[in-house]
Image: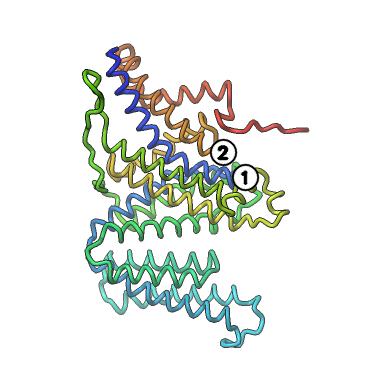
Amino acid sequence: MWNPIFFVEVLIGGLLSGIMYSLVALGFVLIFKASGVFNFAQGAMVLFAALTFVVLLEMGGTVFWDWTAWLSLSFAAIAGALYLSSRYPQLIKLRKKGLLPVFHNRIAIVAAAVAIVAVPLAAGDGGQLMWRGIFITLSIFLVITIGMRQPKAAAAVLLGLALASFFAGEINFWRSLVLTLVIMIVLAQAIEGIVLRPLVNQEPIILFMATIGLNYVMEGIAQGVWDADVHGLEIGIPDVVSEVGVGDFIIYVSQFDLFAAVIAGLLVTGLAIFFNRTRIGRALRAVADDHQAAMLVGISLETIWVVVWAAAGIVAMVAGLLWGSKVGVQFTLVLLAFKALPVLILGGFTSIPGAIVGGLIVGATEKLFEFFIGIPFLGGGTESWSPYMLAMVFLLFRPQGLFGERIIERV
């Protein structure tokens, strides 16, 4: 047990597992940093992403893609017509451009209602694949045209989806990956625009309770649209053990955990470059420091929240694919949100580096405690609760976390 080589193996395994926890915690940090909302539904977003990808992958070249292609073309045409009406309102004899949003909303809702009724009638018994195609294309169309008020963007996204569905052929992995990415970004925008934006300036407990309810709604939608079965997910990363070391000092490391660490590192590096080197990233940092001051210098909070939620959707997709490949795509992926809590407490709720460091500490702690204290002295089973004990100690002595900012309120 106390062999130094075994200790290093356990430590490295814990650190690599901790990076996987950090991926889930990153979604919490991004949203909390920009809007002050603790998104309890982040775990459901991880499940939604993994379940979407694995079902799309398993469907292969089925008629689902035909339904998606033709429906995308139809809604792209409607979105294009809405965009033309915004550029040339005289075409529809609408002299006051202030009435355009109301006009667009009504047309979009009518088009959606007609599609829901007319497509099943025309197709007869289209089955579940037809309804999945209707759900995906209709959600993209409504969220972008009504929620984001961008009919031009809706037309472009739907046209791209139609082309991918028609011509991707046997390249089903990348087609499913791109569609999952689009779905997660649209889902994140729908959450922000429909659920949370109307609750701006409400008490934090109200926003928190809203995300708890949203968590259960998303679980139901994910399993209702796709299914509630357990799926195995293969994304091309080998889950085998490799020998690393020289001479007698040989340790065994999981290749999957190493690849996951590399992917997480690339994702964090990309986010760091985005936040520090781009104009929108600097605006996001300004919003995180002071919402009112950011608004006074002309920064649009709505734009920042759209970007942040889109980034959170992308992070949820990456975490969902990696965790789904590691443990299988199943309902228990939702519980990853609870595993991220000690990571956030240790690293700080507003720090991206803190999420990484907190994940490393949590991963190392649970593995080392389990093997060197839990199994010899407590009979095992300590891996699930030891990180929470460590988080409780942090709350007593440093409640803001290692990288969090200490909040000073003056009376």
Residue depicted at x 45% and y 26%:
388
Q: Nearer the viewer, residue 320 or 298?
A: 298
Residue depicted at x 29% and y 50%:
228
Within the image, what quadrant is residue 351 found in?
Answer: top right
Rate crowding at label 2 as few (under 14), some (14 to 19) or many (20 or more) other CA atoms within 10 Å. Answer: many
Name of the residue lying farthest toward the right? 411
Residue depicted at x 59% and y 30%:
400
Instruction: Classify mark 2: helix, strand or loop.
Output: loop
Q: Quadrant of the N terminus?
A: top left
Within the image, what quadrant is residue 6 found in?
Answer: top left
CA distance for labels 2 and 1: 8 Å
- Find residue 54 and report its horizontal and vertical position in percent: 28, 52
**Is residue 145 positioned above or below 223 on the image?**
below
Q: Nearer the viewer, residue 193 or 261?
A: 261
Where does label 1 land, which residue? 288
Amino acid type of disc 1? Ala
- Find residue 68 and report its horizontal and vertical position in percent: 32, 69
Q: Nearer the viewer, residue 8 or 180?
A: 8
Within the image, what quadrant is residue 122 found in?
Answer: bottom left
Q: Quadrant of the C terminus?
A: top right
User: Relative to 162, is 88 on the left or the right?
Assistant: right
Instruction: Classify mark 1: helix, strand or loop.
Output: helix
Residue depicted at x 55% and y 28%:
402
Amino acid type of disc 2? Thr
Where does label 2 land, which residue? 350
Rate crowding at label 1 as few (under 14), some (14 to 19) or many (20 or more) other CA atoms within 10 Å. Answer: some
**CB within 8 Å, label 2 to label 1:** yes
The tag earlier along the polypeptide, 2 or 1, is 1
- Find residue 325 and report its horizontal and vertical position in percent: 28, 44
- Find residue 84 and report its horizontal and vertical position in percent: 53, 81
**Is residue 227 positioned above or below 392 on the image?**
below
Q: Coloured how?
A: rainbow
